[in-house]
Amino acid sequence: MNSLLGLEAQFQIELLTLRGWEFSDKQKATNLLKHVSLVHLSLLNNNLKYLCRANFDNVMRLHQLDRSLRRALFQSIEVFEISLRRNLGMFFASKYGALNYDDENNFEDTKEHKKWFNGVRNKLINKGLMTDELIVFPVAIEVLTFTGLKVFYESLLKDDQASISKNYDVSANKFLSWLAMLREVRNSCAHHDAIWNQRYSSKSEEHQSEKDFRWLPPLVLDGNKQEKSIFYVILVLSFLLKNIDEKNQQLRTFKSLLEQFSELNLVSRSINIPSKWKSHPLLAIEI
């Protein structure tokens, strides 16, 4: 497949045809390949020919679905990020004072806090928001990236972590694991990576105890382990947004995308979308 990468689109089509791919509209396929690389279309994935039944129409369909999924995930993470930013800012300012985010005594990990604070201070100075005096934390937190929010949360005292995660009905350890996973997802979306077959880190041991397991019964459907799959990411975001997105707009979008992915049967199975996904408690909500 690497031999195709340096060719013009029409020649790529010709070689793909010789290699057993079917095209219902070669002009449409050519137009796509003039603007989207084979790498981005996942055509270097050795399993794609099987998953798409050697039909390039399915590749184009998957490309469209992947783009819609990427946008839906990014938008959902943005909604959650705005909520997290507000909750972190208000909690810390009300407990420690709006100007005491430079005090390492208010943090568990003093080394990480020092590194984090220096980064925040430099950003505030570069943006002209601060000179010698600190500005109030609810304003300062607005310059943080998603990674900065994660580092700040991770540096908090353990009891404070628990107070923040309680807003989202989840334990502090699991919440931190989700933040790490969502940072990866967000970066993938921001860099326009093909996302449908991505796997993301989430500490599976956090789901072992019955207490932690209750938030998502059952985590496993049809015998498929959902840790780290895109389906699992959708479940996590649906859970986090259940009290934020009151009109269930994001959930509606996710359910529509899952319906469409299910029509590409082999693809949906390869990324662990269970055949009975509609019965999952987080997705069975009437909207």
Image (spheres, rainbow, N blue to C red):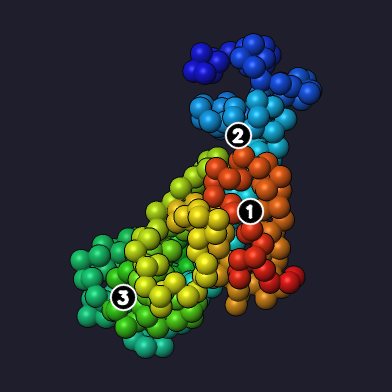
> In what element is the residue under mark 2?
helix
Residue drawn at the location 32% of the way across and 60% of the way down: 119
N-terminal of the pair, mark 3 or mark 1, is: 3
Q: In which quarter of the image is residue 20?
A: top right
Relative to 155, 213 lies left or right:
right
Pointers 2 and 1 in contact (C-beta within 8 Å): no
The x, y position of residue 226, in whole percent, is 49, 56
Q: Is 28 above or below relative to 96? A: above
On residue 156, the disc is 3
Which residue was labeled with disc 2?
Answer: 51
The x, y position of residue 84, in whole percent, is 49, 72
Q: Is 21 above or below relative to 188? A: above
Residue 130 seen: no
The x, y position of residue 116, in whole percent, is 30, 64
Task: Kindly identify the amino acid type of the residue bearing the numbered disc 2.
Answer: Leu
Distance from Cα at disc 3 to Cα at disc 1: 41 Å
